[in-house]
Amino acid sequence: MMSADVTFRWKRGEPPAGTVDARSLLPEKYPGAGVSELAGLPLTIGNRSYRWDDLFDIEGDTAHIWRLPGCENYLYLGARMSCGTLIVEGHAGDYAGLQMRGGLLQAEGAGHRVGANLQGGLIHIHGHVGMEAGGPAPDSMDGMVDGEILVDGNAGPRAGFRLRRGLLSVHQAEEEAGYDLQAGTLVIQQGPLRFPGLNMRRGTILLLDSQTNPDWLPYFQAEACFEPVIVRMILGRLVQLHYAVPRDAIHGTYQLYSGDHLVTGQGEILQLQGRE
């Protein structure tokens, strides 16, 4: 009996050397296509064009769920995806989910600018990602403008670069998280948080680690300490998406820091406070 999913496996255990232009690997591009129809489609790797059946063993039946093998050389996997599901059993490469509009992209890791200029849908990375997660696309000044990106592992420098709307949540972020943040929400589970929110205009950086030293002063200024209702909504949404958050964070007390005061001062960092 054939599977309801379409499963791809590299024929030789790995792809030929070179960048894999993965924009064509989308189930919505071939509605109703069977395995025999997919077999003859072209895929460019480096400067060569291959048939899909030269590269992959393809099994399954017509479905909106595709399971792909991982490859660090993928480029633009899931670009402009609007529906369906891509499950990558490994690394999703650079610019995974570029300008994605809907559907689900799931992978075990990703490279630089995962979810660049994201416009909708959900990206869930069960591992680490490179720099500027949720940042701008090559042809855009805006980072993600809608949708959700969840990263179970660490994110490289400038996670949430120019984030305008939407929700980006990472376990840990390297330096300059939330750089040039315009709006939207960046959740960081664990510090240290080094140079966050530089040039931030609006939006929220939510830090769920009460032990991190708030050395982002003086360009951020300490304000009130309270229990924000919006935090319950944000973390409640993460729980709905089966993304683990600390129990004490949902109803915790948070210190508000306003900034970046070298720009507008209208952004905020909310840091969970420990119990006394």
Image (cartoon, rainbow, N blue to C red):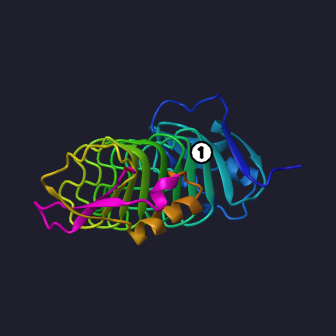
Q: Nearer the viewer, residue 276 or 208?
A: 276
**Quarter of the image where one finds residue 259:** bottom left
Residue at the right extreme? 1
Q: Position of residue 88 (x, y in %)?
A: 59, 45
* Residue receiving disc 1: 88
Is 266 included in the stretch rendered in magenta?
yes
Is disc 1 placed on a helix, strand or loop? strand
Residue pictured at 55% horizontal, 41% vertical: 108
Residue at the bottom extreme? 229
Residue 80 appears in the rendering: no
Q: Nearer the viewer, residue 14 or 42?
A: 14
Q: Position of residue 10 (x, y in %)?
A: 64, 35
Residue at the left extreme? 262
Q: Is residue 77 above or below residue 9?
A: below
State left or right for residue 135 relative to residue 85. left
Residue pictured at 43% horizontal, 49% vertical: 170
Magenta residues span: 247-275
Q: Position of residue 172 (x, y in %)?
A: 39, 43
Q: Nearer the viewer, residue 225 or 117?
A: 225
Residue 268 appears in the rendering: yes
Is 267 included in the stretch rendered in magenta?
yes
Q: How many marks overall?
A: 1
State left or right for residue 271 relative to residue 214. right
Q: Dot 1, how many residues are within 10 Å of its Cα: few (below 14), some (14-19), or many (20+)? A: many
Q: Position of residue 89 (x, y in %)?
A: 61, 40
Q: Amino acid at mark 1?
A: Val
